[in-house]
Image (cartoon, rainbow, N blue to C red):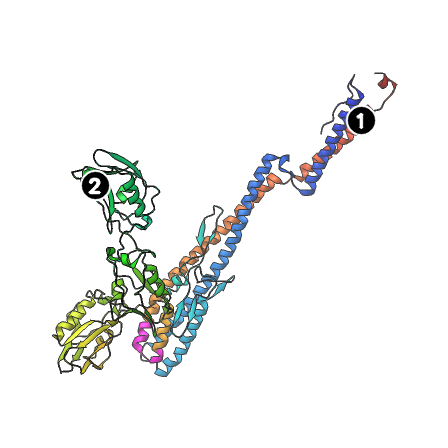
Amino acid sequence: MPIVPVNVARVSQYLKSFTLLNTVQSSNLNLFRIQNQLATGLKFQAPSQDPRSASQALRLDRRLDTIKQVEQNLNTVNATMRSGESAMQDTLDMMIEANTLALQTAGDTASPDERAALATIVDSLIESLVSVGNRTHLGSYLFSGHVTSAPPFELNSQGVRFNGDNGRREAIIDTDYSQDFFTISGQEFFNAVSAGVRGTVDLDPALTTSTRLVDLRGANADGIRMGRIEVSDGSTTSTIDLTNADTIGDVIDRLNDEMPPTLQATFTANAINISPTVVGPLNVTVFDVAGGTTAVDLGIAMTTPAPAILGADLDPILTNRTRIDDLVGGAGLSLTSAIRLRVGEQTADINLSSAETIEDVLNRINQSGIGVEAKISDDGKSIDIFNRVSGPALSIEELGGNTAQLLGIRSSIPTTPLSELNEGRGLDSVDGDDIRITTSNGTVIDIDLDAIDLDNGTIQDLLDLLNTAGGGAITARLADIGSGIELIDNTGGGGLQLERLNVSPALDSLGFQSGTFAGGVVGDDIHPLRVDSPFTALLDLREALQADDTRAIGFAAERLQDVMPVMQRIQGQLASKARAMLDREERLTSEKTATEIMQSDVRDVDLAEAIVRFQQQQIALQANLSTSSQVLRLNLFDFLQ
């Protein structure tokens, strides 16, 4: 509140006027600024008025913007998780209802008509379960993974097909920009994709000049870390920088360009070698520089002088670009015959004879249109094939050749454990003989499956048992066309007869039916792959009720009881996540309030203090004006000075 003194002796009239004018203008400007503060509620209108406070206010503004965006994310996340929890609970309620129904009808108390009537209830449960699986929130499907624009579950005549993926949707859920998931895929909660026909053959691709270093497990199965190495022939040492090498070809070229001229680098199907180019012994060593691991990872490290270096196996992994001719250590595979994919009643014959790369193989299987998915295994050694249709079983069969076996994707192979057959139930037997085989010339062969170890044996043990018992009259083998066991009558072209003995279920568990068959018989696949999902359990239960099959009803009840605990566990995980998200939302609200208070302290004006300053400025202005009227009152003496 300045009041500038101007009545100073021997000061010119002009200086007095100028000083008074500045004082009045300053008072008016201060009044204007305070009026703006009172009108807007802000301490400053431009950063130049208070640079320090403006900088703090900008930081707080950015913080509040982040908090508000995260708050919106959390609102969406929590609403989505509530919808997901509700859908999961509805699913479990239906599963409990189906389990109760199965237990009620598994015994002898229910009549065939009652079971047939209850099948319609199960049919309704299947449709309701598909509807829950296709439930949406804010226009996105809850259980479709990342494929949020299309229904994840499709009910058709074969079963329930899953069209989503195993992705989890994520969002930024904290001001430190950390992310977390807030959805569970139907592949996880409903277990909508089978465990997979796991590849049984290491396809072992060979090294080529175009093999990328990132596609190598390395000599220590820990990848390749590129850096500098030192290579010496005993008299000359070269330091070689491999940092920017991308392929095996790059490594070989750089080694040959920069190593001593007495050495050369080559590669075999799985390793890099360094050998002399001159006659006579050399003392070859290879070291890593500055604590690197490049030489070790490439399998060529040699600290003790040697005449040459034979590198360690770099173990290339399969990629989409891997050529069929480069498989099996460079020997290649001859995929001359087709394979058959069978999902229930649907089949697809896949001709792989013109396939050039692994990608060609995967694409032709994935484009079969019957609900199967092929991909490279997680360890990069083989091909896995998955069934995406709940209900029917997936079988991978030969069509007169051995393509499926070469690729390691045939459903049944000689080393398949007997305990895995028939969906993990193994082979059924009774005390005494289980099966009678009568050939066309009257040879009778009685088989007791207990003669082999049903818990630890393999399909090959079973085939050996049948062939030994047959004494040459029959041949038991895995079928060339199909994927089951084939029995061939070697005694003539008449009829091969199969019978059950002692009311044993063994014949059924081997994939055969009793009867007479000309020349031989091929059984059903006894190692099919089914999706272990609630849909499969309900479809099995419906079929068993319609067929009045109490044994099958019991199997369906077992499947229901097996899948429910897994679903309950996943529901519990989502519920725990939802609770954590709610706590996070509450904490964020407190943080938002604290930030707004800090922002107000920095930016907002104190109205009481501003009003007092406004009054002070008014008094100062009035004083300056009054003083001016007195000081600037002129007389004759003013002109005489």
| Residue 204 drawn at (x, y percent) | 26, 56
User: Could you say which quadrant of the image residue 45 lies in?
Assistant: top right
Tell me which segment is drawn in magenta.
545-556
Eyeballing the image, is 85 above or below 514?
above
What amino acid type should be assigned to the residue bearing mark 1?
A: Ser
* Quadrant containing the N terminus in the rendered view: top right
Q: Position of residue 561 (x, y in %)?
A: 34, 68
Taken as a whole, is the magenta stretch helix, strand or loop? Answer: helix
Asked whether, in this view, residue 214 is left or right of residue 6, the answer is left
| Residue 300 appearing in the image | no
Q: Nearer the viewer, mark 2 or mark 1?
A: 2
73 is higher (above) or lower (below) than 278: below
In-front residue for pair 147/509: 147
Closest to the observer, 467 or 539 = 467
Label 1 residue SS: helix
Report crowding for label 2: few under 14, some 14 to 19, many 20 or more residues within 10 A (C-alpha). few
Q: Is residue 478 above or below residue 241?
A: below
Q: Residue furthest front?
A: 278
User: Can you see residue 448?
Assistant: yes
Residue 551 magenta: yes
Pointer 2: what residue? 277
Contact between labelled residues 1 and 2, with CB atoms less than 8 Å apart: no
Q: Which residue is label 1 attached to?
A: 628
Magenta span includes 622: no
Disc nearer the start of the sequence (2/1):
2
